[in-house]
Amino acid sequence: MQQIVSKSQFKPQALEYLRRVEKDKKPLIITHLGKPVIKIIPFSENVKDKLQAFRNTVVFFKQPTKPVGQDDWEALK
């Protein structure tokens, strides 16, 4: 699970938070006024790990120019 801290919490203890990301191998989200602004993730040289996140996410359309969801519109029936 990723950790979330504000910029004011992060600033005085930046090295400690960076060490924790490195040790735990879990992301750190830094917020400003309650909204996420920065995500720090552990470094990985393993390309397969990065590509794994995209596995089974590509959508293939046989007819890419045909409108999507055309059969769902009541007005077209």
Image: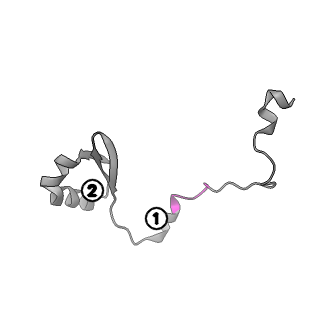
Query: Where does the image place residue 42, in percent across and percent down from the top left?
Result: 32, 62
Work out whether residue 9 or residue 42 is closer to the camera in this orientation and state it.
9
Point 19% across, 51% down: residue: 10
Q: Quadrant of residue 27?
A: bottom left
Residue positioned 52% across, 64% down in the render: 51
**Disc 2 residue type (three-letter):** Asp
x%, y% of residue 33?
Answer: 27, 40
Q: Is residue 1 visible?
A: no
Q: Nearer the viewer, residue 37 or 55?
A: 37
Magenta segment's dominant SS is: loop
Residue on which the image places disc 1: 49
Q: How many marks?
A: 2
- How far across and down, in percent of the image, does residue 64 sit? 77, 54
Q: How is the image coloured?
A: one colour
Does 53 appear in magenta? yes
* Pointer 2 or 1: first along the chain: 2
Q: Secondary structure at mark 1?
A: helix
Badge 2 crowding class, 10 Å Cα cut-off, few under 14, some 14 to 19, many 20 or more, is: few
The reply, left or right, for residue 42 in relation to residue 49 is: left
Which stretch did the figure color magenta? 52-57
Give the camera-side residue of 15 and 65: 65
Residue count near mark 1 (Cα–Cα under 10 Å), binned few <14, some 14–19, many ≥20: few
Q: Return the residue at label 2.
A: 24
Task: Please determine whether, in this image, residue 51 is positioned above or below residue 11.
Answer: below
Q: Amino acid at mark 1?
A: Asp
